[in-house]
Amino acid sequence: MNPLFDRLSSDFLPRFLGGVVVNFEIAGIAIALGLACGLLLAVARLYGGALGAAAAGVIALMRAAPTFVVMFFLLNAIPRDAALFGVPLALSGIMAVALSLLPYAAAYIADAGVEALEQLRRGSPLGSLLFLPNVTRAFFVLGMSSSAGAAIGVPEGIAVILRQAETLPSLGDKLALFAVGIVFFGIPLQAGFAIMTLFQRRLSRAVMRHRKAAPPQRG
């Protein structure tokens, strides 16, 4: 019985690695747009009043938005032949997935942004830096969530594995391929999570030391 890798197509590994790059490309677009929207919502929340209440409502709505529903809505809301001044408006698959992840990204960044801005208000710029590992963690979550693109034919990592699995003769080979994909897809993401967690813990300890060393504020 030949090993699993003898049954795979010769270009499987390059296609899979290229697919993982697509996952991170989607995550990068989503996190960039999420930063723009999320920070505006964070500022609005801190402003308070009716504006703050409206921002809180938008954030709650974004947090509850299902990725698959948003993705298929975007794909079907804009006709494929739609254009503005001759410029096509139809979304590519990659952009559709990135925009479907935008509600989660914006809501997460808004929550983290509120905490960072509160730290700055309290005179703790070091504490506000905790925003950075939170954003990086969100990036890795988005990288995993971008596998939703397999449902619409985006050539990301999981889609490559699914297409390759269709060519394998036995269920055992398919399951083995899925396991290999999970390992190779999960290792960089879990490594990223571990590094960010370590960085966040060290930064949190530095913040606590700074607060203890700071002179008490006079009333």
Image (cartoon, rainbow, N blue to C red):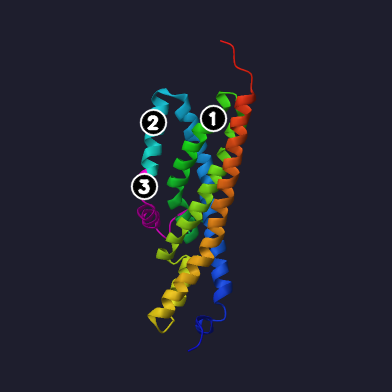
Question: On the image, numbered disc 1 is attached to which residue?
Answer: 117
- Picture coordinates of residue 189, whole percent (x, y): 54, 57
The front one of 201 and 45 is 201
Q: Quadrant of the C terminus?
A: top right
Provide the residue span drawn in magenta: 64-86
Quarter of the image holding residue 150? Answer: bottom left
Identified at 50% across, 32% down, the residue is: 115
Quarter of the image holding residue 178? Answer: bottom left
Q: Is residue 167 magenta?
A: no
- How crowded pointer 3 is (Cα within 10 Å; few <14, some 14-19, many 20+) is rated as some
- How crowded pointer 1 is (Cα within 10 Å; few <14, some 14-19, many 20+) is rated as many
Instruction: Give the Cα separation between the discs numbered 1 and 3.
Output: 25 Å
Question: On the image, numbered disc 3 is attached to which residue?
Answer: 65
Q: Return the disc, 1 or 2, that comes first in the chain's sequence.
A: 2
Q: In the shown orientation, is residue 66 left or right of residue 206?
A: left
The front one of 151 and 165 is 165
Dot 1: what SS?
A: helix
Instruction: Give the Cα separation between the discs numbered 2 and 3.
Output: 17 Å
Identified at 60% across, 26% down, the residue is: 211
